[in-house]
Image (tube, rainbow, N blue to C red):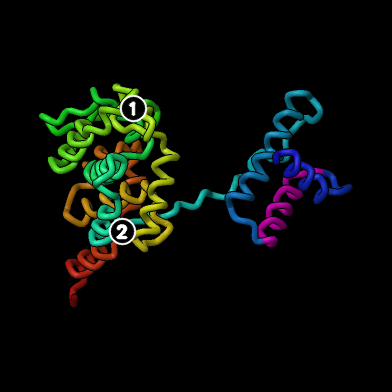
Amino acid sequence: AYRIDIEAFFAFMGTQAVSKALVRKYLMHLNEKKLSPASIRRRLSAVRSFYKFALRERFVKTSPLDEIESPKKQKRLPVAISYEQVKILFNQPDLSSHLGFRDRALMELFYSSGLRLSEAVHLKRVDFRPESLLLNIFGKGKKQRQTPITKNAAQWISDYLSHPVRKIVEKNREMIFLNKWGGRLTARSVDRNFKKYLILSGLSEKIVPHTIRHTIATHWLEKGMDLKMIQTLLGHTSLATTTLYTHVSSKLKREVYDKTHPRA
């Protein structure tokens, strides 16, 4: 892919001398072709890497990419669903099956604590403390945090751990969530199961396990939870990431508008 991007740049350059002006002209050309900012960043990254190599090997004395900025990455607003939609989704797993019971426990956990999918599937028994309603979480960058869990979610997890069928198939006693063969559940399996439940529920196909994380964060905000507290619970490094949720909630916008507009 990098080779194709570099060749495309040299094809555009033709016999012209390479310069910063030419690179800017190339960026304009990519914009005119209606390429997305992500695609333009990738193409520019390929050319930038090539010239770093050329400088290191002394094929060139300067790089035409110096002082050329890549297009800014667009921040996508998180997708959240309503509490009514949450209930519809949670009613889909077949609780007569131990796998359906596991999936419901996972859903309850997502909505209880706003965990990332990777954090949930890597949860170990020792990380679950039902007596204090706390979870030990190892998040991005191996950062550790404690996050509270609702009594309801704790009960679902406890019931799943003591499920008679789980005890029969269990091969991995360390992990909380297991696959049908008794080994550790993978994030890919959870994604696949969610798609199945979405088809059953009739909800938007855009909903993924991570949507539940966005949803509870939005609902916390609507209920008046402080942004710094939400940042801590979600394990966000930057408050700016958490602030995105203020743009999602139409209910919150309405409340702020009503409180602040003189004639509202």
Badge 1, how many Cα within 10 Å: few under 14, some, many 20+?
few
Query: In this view of the protein, can residue 263 be seen by the observer?
Result: yes
Q: Position of residue 73 (x, y in %)?
A: 52, 49
Q: Vertically, is 103 above or below 164? A: below
Label at residue 117: none
| Drawn side of residue 226 relative to residue 97, left or right | left
Q: Mark 2 highlights which residue? A: 81
Quarter the N terminus occupies = top right
| Drawn side of residue 196 relative to residue 40, left or right | left
Residue 25 falls within the magenta-colored stretch: yes
Ranked by sequence position, the earlier of labels 1 and 2 is 2
Name the residue at 41% across, 34% down. 186
Q: Position of residue 174 (x, y in %)?
A: 30, 22
Name the residue at 36% across, 63% down. 202
Q: Position of residue 40 (x, y in %)?
A: 64, 50
Mark toward the viewer: 1 or 2: 2
| Drawn side of residue 69 relative to residue 260, left or right | right
Label at residue 143: 1
Q: Vertically, is 237 above or below 13? A: above
Which region is colored magenta?
18-33
Query: In this view of the protein, can residue 147 be seen by the observer?
Result: no
Please tell me which residue lies in front, 3 or 74. Answer: 3
Q: Name the chief secondary structure element in magenta.
A: helix
Q: Position of residue 38 (x, y in %)?
A: 58, 49
Badge 2, how many Cα within 10 Å: few under 14, some, many 20+?
some
